[in-house]
Amino acid sequence: MEVVRAYIAPRTGWRRVIHYWRHRMQRLPDSPTRIALGVACGVYASFTPFFGFHFMIAAGLAWLLRGNIFASAIGTFFGNPLTFPFIVAICLELGGLIMGSPVDSDFIEQGLHQMAIMLLRDISSLVIPYFVGGIIPGLISAVASYMVVRPLVATYQRRRRNRLIARTRARIAKQNNVVSE
């Protein structure tokens, strides 16, 4: 029970948790390309019908494509309670169009709260169209996220490196002044 409580209400508070993850993300020791690729893998995984396994799918894709695995976990946050209704609707509609069998619109209108029951009940008419329909928007979203994240990470890392160099030069200059006095 304590573990469940820790996920819902961390002992140190959500602000501390968010600060920690932000700090971790800022210090990812990888190239901008690998970090952006990891985020793109996470975004793509959000378009699969395998809810509950998006982290594992994203990590597997990042590992195969040599992207950053931690960044792939961050990328899965693209799929969240605010975006999932849109992702589900787009994937099911597009999958139905591609497969030539439109998905029952009642499913889309009912929302996510009954999705698990309906997916288990009628796997062939929902999961397969969802999977097929998620390929194209998933790839488009992944490429777009890569194109946005890569230059942002490169700029951030360059600025951080320049700040560290300036701080080190200032420290060395201060030491030289102390030694010469």
Image: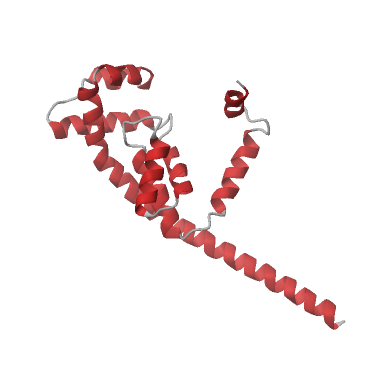
Q: Is residue 36 left or right of residue 89?
A: right
Please tell me whether residue 66 is drawn above or below residue 125 in the rendered image: below
- Looking at the image, which residue sits at the far left? 100
Q: Is residue 156 left or right of residue 104?
A: right
Q: Position of residue 12 (x, y in %)?
A: 68, 34
User: Which image quarter is the N terminus in?
Assistant: top right
Q: Quadrant of residue 56?
A: top left
Foreground pick, 60 / 50? 60
User: Which image quarter is the C terminus in?
Assistant: bottom right
**Residue at image location 14% in from the left, 32% down from the top:** 99
Q: Position of residue 16 (x, y in %)?
A: 65, 39
Please tell me whether residue 124 is drawn above or below residue 60 in the rendered image: above
**Residue at image location 42% in from the left, 38% down from the top:** 55
Residue 55 seen = yes
Number of marks in picture: 0
- Looking at the image, which residue sits at the far bottom? 180
Colour mode of the rendering: secondary structure
Q: Position of residue 158 (x, y in %)?
A: 53, 65
Q: Quadrant of residue 107?
A: top left
Please tell me whether residue 157 is drawn above or below residue 62 in the rendered image: below
- Looking at the image, which residue sits at the far right? 181
**Residue at image location 23% in from the left, 20% down from the top:** 105
Residue 42 seen = no
Q: Quadrant of residue 122?
A: top left
Foreground pick, 59 / 154? 59
Q: Position of residue 22 (x, y in %)?
A: 57, 46
**Residue at image location 79% in from the left, 75% down from the top:** 175
Q: Is residue 172 left or right of residue 76?
A: right
Please tell me whether residue 111 is drawn above or below residue 161 in the rendered image: above
